[in-house]
Amino acid sequence: MRYGMLMLVAVCLAGSLAQPPPPAQPQRPIYTALVSDVEPEILAGRTFVPAAVISREFGATVTWVPEMQRVHIARANEPTLLLTIGSRTALVSGQMVTLPAAPYLTRGRTMVPLRFIAETYRIPVMYDGATRTVQLTHANRLYVLPLQSLRAGVVIADPRPGELVRTGLRVQGVANVYEGALIIEVRDSGGQVLGRTIATAGMGGFYPFSTVVYYNLPSDDPSNGRIVVFSQNGRDDGRILAEDSVPVVLASTI
C-alpha cells in the first residue's frame, strides 16, 4: 500500500513538474514624448532638434563653445561629437565626417541632425510617415517626436490585434485631436463597456499616449473583446472626432 502511495505521489510530482510555465508577458517599450522647446525642423530631408534634447533624454553632455560657434556632445563610453554652426564637417572622436546639412542657430538653440547623433550612439531611429513622427528606442522607452500635422487621428500600437490581454491593460499609441483628450475603453463582444479611462492627446501633432485601463470580466474564461480609443466633441453634438480600435482576447486576471 505504501509502495502504491509513493508511486502515486511520484507520478503527481512528475506531472506537476512537466507543466510548462505560463508564457511571460512581452515587455513593450513605454511610449514617451520627445519634448523640444523649439519646434523640430526638416532640412535637406533630415530632422533637426535642439542639442539639449539629446542631453536631456539620452544621457549625453552638451557643451556650447560660443567663441568658436561649436557644440561638443559627449556620452559615457561612446564617441564624442564636435559640430560647428554653418559647417557640414563634423568630428566623431577626432575623425572627420560629412553631415547631410549644417547645424544652425534658431531662437537661441543649437539645431543638430537628430538621426546622425542618435545612430552614432546606436539608438535606433524610425520615421513614421503615416503619423509624421520620428521614433527612437532607448532604455525600454519608445520616444516619439511629433512633427507638425494637420490630420487628426488615433493609432493604437499596443496591444496588437488578436493578442491575449489581462487587466490592468497598458494601451499605447499616438493621437492628434482637437479636444486634447482621449477616452480608452475595453468592450466585450457585445459592445458593453467593461472598463474606461482618459488620457491626454496632442493638438497639432501625433503625440504619444500611454495609460493603464482596468476592467471587470464577468467570466473567468477568456473571451473576445475590443480596445477602443477615441476623442469626442463633448461641447456640441458629441460626435467622434477620431477613433481607432483593435480586437483582442480578454482574460480576467494577471
Image (cartoon, grey):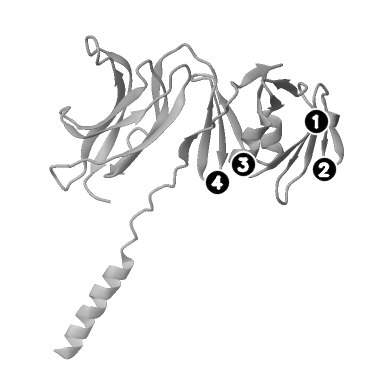
| Of marks 3 and 4, the one in the foreground | 3
Tell me which label, 1 or 3, sits earlier in the chain.
3
Counting from the top left corner in percent of width and height, residue 120 is at 72, 38
Which residue is disc 4 drawn over?
Answer: 139
Within 10 Å of the Cα at label 3, are there few (<14), some (14-19), or many (20+) other Cα atoms? some
User: Looking at the figure, which quarter contains the N terminus?
Assistant: bottom left
Counting from the top left corner in percent of width and height, residue 226 is at 26, 31
| Of marks 1 and 3, the one in the foreground | 1
Q: Residue at x 21, y 46 (%)?
A: 252
Tell me which label, 1 or 4, sits earlier in the chain.
1
Which residue is disc 3 drawn over?
Answer: 58
Counting from the top left corner in percent of width and height, residue 89 is at 84, 28
| 54 lies left or right of 159 | right
| 26 lies left or right of 95 | left
Within 10 Å of the Cα at label 4, are there few (<14), some (14-19), or many (20+) other Cα atoms? few
Q: Which mark is residue 66?
A: 1
